[in-house]
Amino acid sequence: MTDTTTALRIDLNGQVREYDLGSDPSQHYRVIGRALLDSVEAVEHIERPTGPNVVVLARVHRAGQPLNLWAAAASDALESQITQLVAGEVLFIGYVAATETITSLPDDAAALIREACILP
């Protein structure tokens, strides 16, 4: 695998940051942990009719953090209503369920996430 894998993090102020997760699957988890500064858990699985699914990751220890309304807007833009409002920073990644592998966030999903975080 020579291609890098990208993910998008949404900060509490709506800023979107792109993360290069690297090309090595073992590196993906290290970079994800550093991106969220904690252990992570999947808080939303967004199944897509074509291409990889999207998984929303958040910190395990997020109690006391402000709610990330930008992440809720991005989830809504992906036609999935997040089942719980998530506190703290959130990371969107691509995921192939059949092979249980992390992959790059699909370009169309990344564009929708970025658009959802632009102030009206």
Image (cartoon, helix red, strand yellow):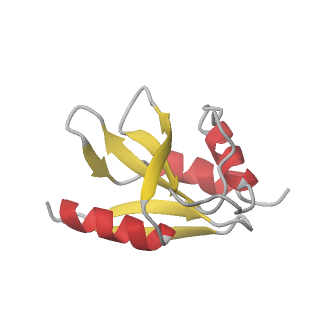
On the rendered image, what quadrant is the N terminus found in?
Answer: bottom left
Residue 20, can we see it? no
Query: Could you tell me residue 73's position as x and y percent?
Result: 71, 46
**In the figure, is residue 68 to the left or right of 107?**
right
- In front here: 102 or 85? 85
Identity of the residue drawn at 70% across and 65% down: 12
Identity of the residue drawn at 34% across and 43% down: 95
**In the figure, is residue 45 to the left or right of 65?**
left
- In front here: 108 or 37? 37
Identity of the residue drawn at 61% across and 48% down: 112
Q: Quadrant of residue 34?
A: bottom left
Residue 7, can we see it? yes
In the rendered view, tell whether residue 112 sits above or below residue 37.
above
Query: Could you tell me residue 22's position as x and y percent?
Result: 27, 69
- Outermost residue, top direction? 49
Query: Could you tell me residue 40's position as x and y percent?
Result: 44, 57
- Outermost residue, right direction? 120
Q: Quadrant of residue 24?
A: bottom left
In the rendered view, tell whether residue 80 sits above or below residue 112.
above
- In front here: 34 or 75? 34
**In the figure, is residue 35 to the left or right of 74?**
left
